Amino acid sequence: MNNTELRSFLREARSRRPELTILENEPMSRHCSFRIGGACDAMLLPSSIADVEAVCALLAECGEKPFLMGNGTNLLVTDAPLHRIVLRMGEEFSRVDPVSGTALRAESGATLSRLASFAAARGLAGLEFAHGIPGTLGGAASMNAGAYGGEMKDVVTSVTYLDKDLSLRETDDAGFSYRHSRFSDTDCIVLGAKISLREDDPDAIRERMRSLAERRRSSQPLDMPSAGSTFKRPAGGYAAALIDGAGLKGYTVGGAQVSEKHAGFVVNRGGACFDDVLRLIEHIQNEVYRVSGIELEPEVKIIRE
């Protein structure tokens, strides 16, 4: 939308939802774990389903779609201005409630670390793998995030979402597969999920979480900005091993580097721009294919415009 249309949209959004937080000309670098990204036209932070419905309806009236994001931990965003309305599910849309038995229901802005801790405090096991994943439930459910042998498909039993026609729906068939679900790359907006767990001793759960956290600290470059694992796991192998085998550990393009600690991570070692990371990703893909004949597919979502 042009500037006149943008100003009209923002006025109407404030009129319809007076308490909605709106950040204009907001740098995406502040909200993405890579610490890279130009300013978006506006970032809206909903605190309720009603906020999401109202904003999406207004955008539809303008012939636009929202750019949906959670914690920004799986995004590489262009340095150029992002002429989009960003809908970020965050702290104000992160309610977690116990349901009957061993189930929880959570809104999509809840972080996985908070969700896992909430469950552990109640003696509910099954989310230990997710405690160190730095994303939110909405993004994790959409991409079937996983680590250390666990995936969201193991615990998510139903998903609440807005479909492409902005109808509120719930389904127990999320179509989960490796790093994918029926909500991936669609116009559906995940609003929350029901999570089914199992009873266990809270101390035992916390010990498993502590052990996994130590494994992460010892093997991953958690002290440097990144978007986690840069590539999806190829069939029959591991991206990190293939990258290391191509002699690329520590390889640098501008401020972007293949982590010297874990070759599966591309990190921002300081001052990296969008093009640095993109060129490094492409170089990794080319070299790994040249050496092994295997094509690596990015797990990080690349936003060019």
Image (cartoon, grey):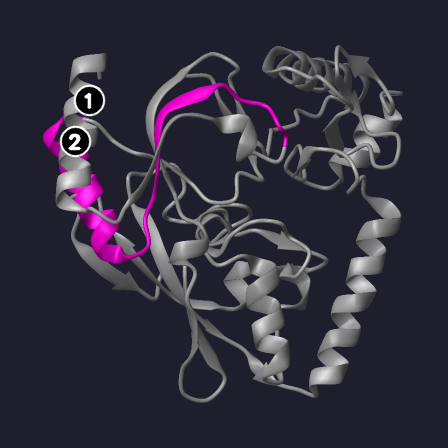
Residue highlighted by disc 2: 11
Horizontally, residue 131 falls left or right of residue 91, namely right
Residue 140: image x %, image y %? 51, 51
Which label was assigned to residue 72? none
The quadrant of the rendering that contains the N terminus is top left
Q: Give the class, few, some or many, for how many residues have Cα within 10 Å of label 1's Cα (few <14, many ≥20).
A: few
Q: Residue at point 59% right, 16% down?
A: 274
**x 57%, y 59%: residue:** 112
- Residue 276 visible? The answer is yes
Q: Is residue 2 visible?
A: no
> Would residue 133 be counted in the magenta stretch?
no
Q: Which residue is mark 1?
A: 7
Q: Left or right? Give the position of 290 relative to 140.
A: right
Segment colored magenta: 34-63
Q: Secondary structure at mark 1?
A: helix
Does residue 277 appear to the left or right of 107 in the view shown?
right
